[in-house]
Amino acid sequence: MGRRSRKSGQAAPESVRRTPPPGLERAKPDMRAQYASRSAKSEARNAEVRAKLRPLAPDEHPRPLKFGIATCLVLAISNVTLALSGYELQNSDTDGANAYVGVTAFSIILVVAAVGMYKHKYWAILGFQALLALTVLIAGLSVVVASNVLALVLCLAVIAYGGWLFWSMIRVMARVQMPEARRPR
């Protein structure tokens, strides 16, 4: 029977020690060279893409940005409309006051994000992308508990649209000018 634990200070006998497979020492420099060449090619492609990027003009709104603004506004308006029309909110207390505060706060956040994205504010686009990522994640987890075909299709539609919009907004964010950092006094 073999031992189940090792005692400190004892080394394995020479015959038991593993030797590296033949040719491994020779392959390492080749692998390093391949990695360096791939890294250089990748950096060259990145530099080429960066050179092609031009900042957004003040009146320029690419299609993904328009879709993001429209999504924020549609969600904000529909949330407030449903809440005001008497739609029963889930997880609301007896008078529903807390639920209405939550709906109102979220709708205000969406409107602020839409206005910020319209004005090309970096923080607004980044915040909207964070909301998109969270929405796609929740929709992905909801697929597991979808109880009918309609719920499954709705989850998959949210994942597809949110994923596409998230991916498309990356290029827009690259073109938005970052605000200059303030120097400490």
Image (tube, rainbow, N blue to C red):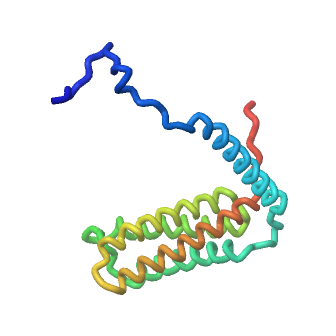
Q: Quadrant of the C terminus?
A: top right
Front-most of residues 69 and 25: 25
* Residue 173 percent coordinates (x, y): 69, 61
The x and y percentages for residue 112 are 60, 65
- Quarter location, residue 62: bottom right
**Residue 15 point in image, percent of width and height:** 36, 24
Residue 63 picture quarter: bottom right
From what the image shows, is residue 88 above or below residue 107? below
Q: Is residue 151 above or below residue 11?
A: below
Q: In this figure, what is the number of numbered marks?
A: 0
For the N terminus, which image quadrant? top left
Residue 37 seen in this snapshot: yes
Identify which residue is drawn at 75% across, 53% down: 41
Name which residue lies at 34% across and 20% down: 13
Residue 166 in the image: state x and y as whole percent: 59, 67
Q: Quadrant of residue 64?
A: bottom right
Visible residue check, residue 101 = no
As drawn, which residue projects farthest toward the left? 1
Name the residue located 32 percent from the left edge and 71 percent from the top edge: 144
Given residues 71 and 81, the one toward you in this image is 71
| Residue at (41% x, 77% y) in the render | 155
In the rendered view, does 22 fall on the left or right side of 122?
left
